Image (cartoon, rainbow, N blue to C red):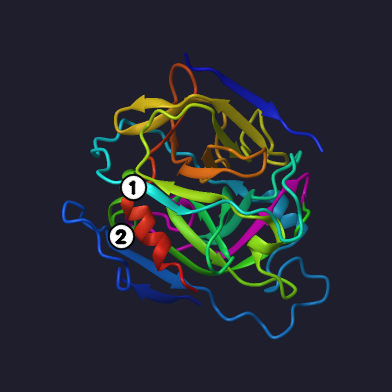
Amino acid sequence: MRRTTVRLLAAGILLVTGAAGAPAAAASEVIAPTTAVRAPALPPKAPAGALDATGYWTAEKLRNAIPADLPTGTPSKQGTSTSSGVASKPVAPRGTKLANDAVPSTAGKLFFTDNGLNYVCSASTINNNYKNLIITAGHCVHSGAGGAWHSNIVFAPAYYNGQSGYGLWNWSQARAFDSWINSSDFTHDQAFVTLQQRNGANLIDAVGGNGLVWGNSQSQPGTRIWGWPAEPPYNGEVPYYCDGDTYAWGADAALTCSMNGGASGGPWLKDRIDANLGYVFAVTSRRTTSGTPTLLSTPNTPDVKTMFDQMTT
């Protein structure tokens, strides 16, 4: 039986190409190529009173950011993965015990600029060796076929009513699949972003990191999806989550949930340790627009694990 709840919680770019350096895949797996871009160098000193190290983001820009469209979906026809595994395990913030946070520190809003306009998605942290990684939707870092890379990317963990309890974290590198960049292939609507240190600290040490898994089936009991929906009746200022058992919708995972634009890129968590930590097996990619509101995502494939391994800076 599927059960679902939606709850409001109180409280200048350098192109980097290819899949070089990725571990060998099984003979039956074909590695999907990826491309990355690097952020421009940060200024030596942030402007006085700036919210981020570049000085671009202001409270007004954050407040007025447009919710990135959560595209409508049709069932994906991609076959199921022939391998599965755990890429990383969850970790709590350094010096902090696991706790049920009213607003998750390991998820937040992802702000960016596209074609001169400011937008917002959702994203979540992923534990890695460099303690600097987040995962989101591919369409939250690149516009897809005919589009371009986004700029001015910052992550605001635990965003709540105009504030992030951990400040804004500037991007270092973003990577997406070539099939998304060139063809808007929603089976590869995933992306990773590395973040620069803030006040000498690494992101994962400060807020904690979720684990990452790949090759899971579409049907996952006890899934939680986090997001910051920002289209009516939501306003993007507080996080929401949907709980329930996902089910197969073509090759996608699906969960009844009314979140909308702004929720793109939010984590789909399985095997949760607590309200703040779990294993990300998918990210919000699309939604239905008729019938019962439903979120859709292609579960992480071995390609996502390969892209994870490429995020070394």
Residues 287 and 21: in front is 21
Pointer 1 local density, CA inside 10 Å: few below 14, some 14–19, many at least 20: many
SS of the residue under disc 1: loop
Residues 303 and 188: in front is 303
Pointer 2 local density, CA inside 10 Å: few below 14, some 14–19, many at least 20: many
In the rendered view, would you say 81 is above or below 96?
A: above
The percent coordinates of residue 162 (x first, y second) are 77, 49
* Quarter of the image where one finds residue 57: bottom right
Q: Is residue 91 left or right of residue 199?
A: left
The percent coordinates of residue 246 (x first, y second) are 45, 27
What residue does disc 2 label?
A: 178
SS of the residue under disc 2: helix
In the rendered view, would you say 157 is above or below 287?
A: below
Gap in angstroms between the C-alphas marked 2 and 1: 15 Å
Report the residue at 61% width, 22% height from top. 5
The residue segment tinted magenta is 138-163
What residue does disc 1 label?
A: 301
The percent coordinates of residue 280 (x first, y second) are 50, 45
Q: Amino acid at mark 1?
A: Thr
* Quarter of the image where one finds residue 72: top left
Q: Is residue 304 left or right of residue 280?
A: left
> Does the magenta portion include 87?
no
- Tag in front: 2 or 1: 1
